[in-house]
Image (cartoon, rainbow, N blue to C red):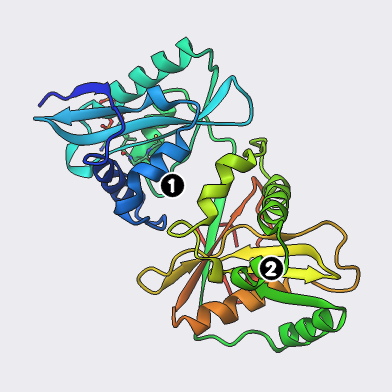
């Protein structure tokens, strides 16, 4: 069986096919409404719009690869996959060679990509193609049926006494006209703070802004910690899917608030998840040496991470 590899010209009809492949390749990631596939792909590939490639068999798209901007102009992030029933037919290799040629022409010298520890075939594929592991993201989960530790409620009370208010995205938006700018600044600081060997660079506000509107983020699922009118922390819950909700990386701003533990925002997040009747939380944390102690104290258990 042969596949034709060609440039994909973004179009509404075929965009959902790319999403379907992505979801089948990475079922652990939360899915996005297929209606918005083109919009999301367009946002993600900004700067590399002409570098989307697909593998077609009898005109059916069975694999894809595209690049996203990374921390320097000479590096890029590769996103790609092949439908499981079309694997080991060298389609992945052909897509990779095509995208590497494209990258070379664009003066890109470093390609970063992500796969799961449990995907042995993908790891072998990447290893054979001279990728080396530089970082790990550890996901852990907890059942919402298990009570939160009592200690957490004491911390929460202390934090609230110190003047910290927890607001959801809808409430926060009503508080100040520059709410989205504040959120963006905090979000960039948070992501920069995630310990990782891969440097982080800010996403420009104009590129980030469309992503906080539904269907990408539900504003009622975002928690903000505000102290004396200042935004000091936030936590984003993803979309509820089959009883699972994802907590995005979260952090408090350095050194604020002075006398409270903003880990309690996670407690609030769990309470909010509970209100939505979901059963589990996933919590990604990125680091070469992940510190999962705080996760464990919240009743999360490690998935594929050192105990
Ligand atoms: C990684 C991935 C794209 C490879 O696609 P593929 O079409 O199966 O890859 P190919 O057929 O071109 O395989 C090329 C090499 O991968 C290895 N490989 C792939 N599947 C394999 C399998 N089932 N068993 C053994 N080796 C395998 C082999 O080394 C093979 O080379 P060889 O035949 O010369 O020994 C595919 O496994 C996938 O979609 N994985 C999930 C998404 C993902 O992890 N993407 C990685 C980041 S881009």
Asked if residue 262 can be seen in this view, the reply is no
Per the model, the C-alpha gap separating discs 1 and 2 is 31 Å
Left or right: where 81 falls relative to 90: right
Of residues 137 and 182, the one drawn nearer to the viewer in this rendering:
182
Location of the C terminus (image quadrant): bottom right
Asked whether mark 1 lies closer than 8 Å to ligand 1, one says yes
- Locate residue 176: give its quadrant: bottom right
Ligand 1's quadrant is: top left
Q: Is residue 237 above or below residue 143?
A: above
Q: Residue 128 location in percent, x, y?
A: 39, 25
Q: Quadrant of residue 171?
A: bottom right
Q: Residues within 10 Å of mark 1 (few under 14, many from 20)?
A: some
Indicate the position of residue 141 as horizontal and vertical percent values: 51, 69
Above or below: residue 20 compared with residue 216 = above
Out of 41 and 252, give the one closest to the viewer.
41
Q: Quadrant of the N terminus?
A: top left
Judged from this view, the residue extending furthest toward the right is 258
The residue located at (59%, 35%) in the rendering is 134
Q: Nearer the viewer, residue 292 or 242?
A: 242
Q: Which mark is residue 116?
A: 1
Q: Which residue is mark 2?
A: 224
């Amino acid at each position: 069986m042969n596949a034709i590899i060609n440039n994909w010209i973004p179009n509404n009809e075929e965009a959902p096919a790319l999403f379907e492949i992505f979801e089948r390749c990475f079922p652990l990631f939360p899915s996005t409404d297929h209606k918005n596939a083109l919009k999301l792909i367009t946002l993600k590939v900004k700067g590399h719009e002409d570098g989307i490639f697909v593998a077609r068999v009898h005109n059916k798209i069975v694999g894809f690869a595209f690049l996203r901007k990374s921390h320097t102009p000479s590096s890029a992030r590769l996103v790609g996959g092949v439908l499981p029933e079309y694997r080991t037919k060298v389609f992945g290799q052909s897509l990779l060679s095509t995208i590497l040629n494209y990258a070379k022409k664009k003066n890109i010298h470093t390609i970063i990509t992500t796969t799961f520890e449990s995907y042995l075939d993908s790891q072998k594929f990447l290893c054979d193609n001279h990728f080396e592991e530089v970082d790990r993201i550890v996901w852990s989960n907890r059942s919402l049926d298990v009570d939160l530790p009592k200690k957490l409620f004491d911390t929460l009370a202390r934090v609230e006494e110190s003047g910290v208010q927890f607001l959801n995205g809808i409430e926060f938006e009503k508080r100040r006209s520059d709410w989205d700018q504040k959120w963006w600044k905090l979000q960039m600081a948070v992501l920069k703070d995630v310990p990782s060997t891969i440097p982080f660079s800010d996403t420009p506000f104009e590129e980030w802004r469309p992503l906080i509107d539904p269907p990408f983020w539900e504003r009622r699922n975002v928690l903000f910690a505000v102290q004396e009118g200042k935004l000091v922390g936030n936590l984003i819950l993803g979309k509820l899917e089959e009883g699972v909700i994802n907590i995005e990386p979260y952090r408090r701003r350095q050194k604020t608030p002075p006398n409270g533990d903003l880990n309690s925002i996670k407690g609030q997040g769990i309470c909010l998840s509970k209100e939505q009747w979901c059963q589990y939380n996933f919590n990604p944390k990125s680091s070469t040496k992940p510190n999962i102690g705080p996760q464990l104290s919240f009743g999360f258990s490690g998935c594929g991470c050192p105990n």
